[in-house]
Image (cartoon, helix red, strand yellow):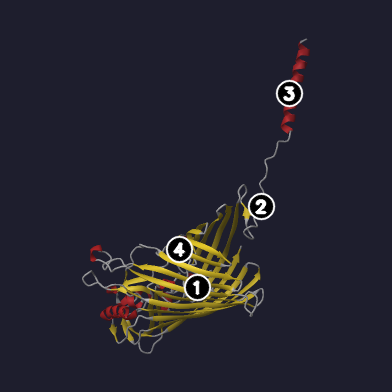
Amino acid sequence: MKMVKGLFLGSAAALVAMSGAQAADLPLKAKAVEYVKVCSIYGAGFYYIPGTDTCIKLGGYLRADATLYGSSNYNAPAWNGAAGAKSRLANNTIMYMRQDINIDTRTATEYGVVRTYFDANFNWGSGGAVGGSTGIANGGLGVYYAFIQFAGFTFGKAVSQFDTPWTGYPGNNTSFLIGGYDDVTGINQVSYTAQFGNGVSAAISLEDQSAYLQSALYNVSGLTNAGFATGVYGTSSYAGTSIPDIVGQLRVDQAWGLFQLSAAAHQVRASYYNTALETSGHPSDTWGYAVQGAISLKNLPTGPGDSINFTATYANGASRYVIGGVTGNSFSVYGSSNLGYQSIAIAAAADGVFAGTDVTNGTGISKTTAWGVRGAFNHNWNPYWSTSLFGSYSSLEYGATGRSLVCGAATSVITGVGTCNPDFKIAQIGTVTRWTPVKNLTLSGEVMYTYIDQSNSGVVNLSAVSAVAKPAAAYEFKDLGVWSGNLRVQRVF
């Protein structure tokens, strides 16, 4: 009996074990897989973020640059510093690399499309620290764009509403084609754009002037002999910002091309006559302005894809709208001479100048005026080869009062037979040829000539400028030019 009972219990245990094993082998209901779907509403490259109605596009480029006879990264001409001095302290060849990454998202709502855009880049260059912050071995991180667009508004860092769609690049590679506005790296703003249909739009914007739109504002009482030799006409005395630049734009964008009018109001606000002492007082604030006309012509008879891009800009007390972007405020180029140790061409771009050490002897701000034209003709030889011919012409004048202030301060610290006049003009012309052997891979070579036409003349005795190894000597004022070149390989994805 005990044996029979044991057999029954053993059988029961075996059945339980078998049923458990079979249950474990039963297929479970699989969780639904969320496949990435193409989002064709906003163009090629967009995909739906799984589980959302938001579309996203990832892009960017990798770029390798070599600058020949420049002064820094981005193919800057040798127009200041050691490069402008043509001394052995300068790097005649500069290597520069960049990895750019951008993220574009779009979401359709009952109020219209909500868009976010972010563009950042990692940089490394032998021409000095690059990007917004420095890291290891002259590397840097730069944030070009970061903005939200909703119901016609733009909040964040985006291309200025004053600027054109091609920003500072009508056809060039270099970031230093002056003669017009350039904030290709974006500017903080709050703007509203109204679309009227048929390609007609208008925009109004408040834009942060502190990063890119403040040129020099010199107190000439701080002018020194050595500073004059580098194109610095006194103590830099811009105050902190009080009112952002107020910008307006009207644009017509058609199949034939584009026409645009832009205007900006710019506050010119000095710190103190003595920058270290608030009781010294300050000049009264004043306002400058800038206006720009732009045109782009497409579908030219010269060939498919050919275009002409052109801008003309005028500024009063707002010189960055003409000589802007990453361009420095001062220019100083040395050359040969039969009248002195060497020749020198100097120039300083400023929004204005004033003089004085306190309210008892201080003057008001005398604003400068500037104008410039810039453009390019872009021609496609065939689907693989293209060439652009580009150029610019810029002029800046200090006016009678400004010239008197600068030259009065200069003659008090500089001796010689030179005639002082801080007005100047800069002409540039260049060409770039691009080869695209496969889609989104482009190799290009560029060359540009920059000519500084200054208004100083004669011979002047200048102090030593140790930063560029120039001795104290007699130098001849002379108009001078410099060549610069660039080789680039860029892969876009």
Residue at 73% over, 33% down: 25
Q: Earlier in the sequence, mark 2 or mark 3?
A: 3
Q: Which mark is residue 205?
A: 4
- Residue 124: percent from left, percent from top: 50, 64
Local crowd size for mark 3, using a 10 Å CA cut-off: few (<14), some (14–19), many (≥20): few
Where's residue 152, x and y in %? 52, 59
Which kind of residue does numbered mark 4 sit on?
Answer: Ser
User: Residue 397 vs residue 70: left or right?
Assistant: left
Looking at the rendered structure, which numbered label has been put on residue 37? 2
Asked if the residue under mark 3 is in contact with the one under mark 2, i.e. CB atoms within 8 Å, the reply is no
Kindly state the secondary structure of the residue where label 1 is placed.
helix
According to the picture, the residue beneath numbered tag 1 turns out to be: 75
Give the Cα separation between the discs numbered 2 and 1.
42 Å
Residue indicated by mark 3: 16
Looking at the rendered image, the disc whose residue lies closer to the viewer, 3 or 4, is 4
Q: Name the amino acid type tagged 3.
A: Val
Along the line of sight, which residue is nearer the eye, 334 or 170?
Answer: 170
Secondary structure at numbered mark 4:
strand
* Distance CA(mark 4)–CA(mark 1): 31 Å
> Which of the 4 image quarters holds residue 332?
bottom left
